[in-house]
Image (tube, rainbow, N blue to C red):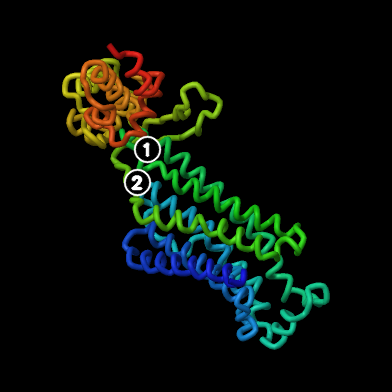
Amino acid sequence: MDFDAVIVGIFYAVLGVNLFLVVWALAEQGETPHKYLLVLYLSNLISVLDDIYDLSEWWRLAPQLYNAYIPACFLTAPAIYLYIRSLVSTSKHRHFEPLSKHWLGFALSTALCAPYFLLDADVKLERLLTPAGALEHLGIVTLGPFICLLLVVPFSLIYLFASLREISSNNIRIKAFFSDIEDKTLSWVRWSIIIFSLVLIFSTLQLFMPDSITDSKTWRTIYSLFGYSWLLTIGVMAIRQKSIEIDQRLNVELDAVGPDIQNHTNDSLAKSQIKYKNAQLSDGETQAIAGKLVTAMKDKQLFRTPGLTLRDLTDELDISQNKASQVLNSHLDIGFYDFVNSWRVAQAKLLIVEEPKSLIDIAYEVGFNSKSTFNAAFKKHAGQTPSQFKKSNQR
């Protein structure tokens, strides 16, 4: 098989995946995150179609469409950012924003490229058939697309960095509300962003590489496979991802200071600076609530409830979420997530020593939803893995 046919075949496969994702996103438009995914898939669809258009030399038949993909490149990164923000942010960002400032990159790039798009088709075809070194610049007509291509990478990287910050803030925030966060950390989005960032960096490096390399069939095949691998990841995982609903009745503002990258000993996030809008609790009230929280874990063993949330706990104790969170963070010096899982680990240690059960059975019995979460929490609170603990306590 001719190698060009292999490359085109790759793009057709990607096109099929992309079309499926567009149809799926159209069918799921009831949720705001899916509307941003639709923008993402459509922008990528335009890029894939342009690659097929270029490799199949359809530009000979329709030269007026050449470089039509450039403005669409300014939609991809903002769509990713807005998708993440709509998943994790408060209600004010739950609505689709068709006139958002984040689409200005697309509008401006369209305006810059417009003179080239309006260029006579015969003139454009003649230029496409002329060797690159012999081309005559046509001022703003040819300068517009060139400027856009130079700007799209830094523009996109800024949005991707902002997306990673949103994910980081989310991973701190959710620990104040949930005892199980495995499906809420958006780790798959983080890896998709990293892959996409590498693709953008590679595309920048191509500008400084010899044509003998960048135009080679091997390079184009590898680059094509790498460049669109992130699309499949986003497509498959986004179908399963649900919005992270945080109960807004918790009147707490989390001003996250970010991960403590210096603290490798316990691999924990830095403590959040927490500000409470309500008045500070009295010592007596603080002690009473702290007692209720400990009793709920020690006597009622609410930690055994899979997926226990702060709302579940406070409803059971008939106290406000704000007060419970304030006591946990300010008095007991621990967040809700670690508070619940420390009790789960303590109970698991007892069962490992006393019960002839498998570790996974014990994990589910004490309230964990997965083996990976159980192992991570156990290592954090017990200082060793469940297997190591079991081996060291065998009778």
In the picture of the structure, the residue carrying the numbered disc 1 is 174
Quarter holding the C terminus?
top left
Under mark 2, the amino acid is Ile
In the picture of the structure, the residue carrying the numbered disc 2 is 244
The secondary element bearing badge 2 is classed as loop
Under mark 1, the amino acid is Ile
> Can residue 314 be seen from the camera position used here?
no
| Pointer 2 with pointer 1, Cβ within 8 A | yes
Q: Is residue 343 left or right of residue 270?
A: left
Spatial CA distance of label 2 from label 1 is 8 Å
Residue 116 image point, x, y percent: 68, 77
The secondary element bearing badge 1 is classed as helix
Q: Give the residue displayed 61% in from the left and 84% down from the top.
A: 62
Q: Earlier in the sequence, mark 2 or mark 1?
A: 1
Q: Nearer the viewer, residue 286 or 305?
A: 305
Which corner quadrant of the image does residue 61 belong to? bottom right
Q: Give the residue displayed 38% in from the left and 69% down from the top.
A: 23
Q: Give the residue displayed 17% in from the left and 20% down from the top.
A: 299
Res 262 label: none
Q: Is residue 35 left or right of residue 343?
A: right
Quarter holding the N terminus?
bottom right
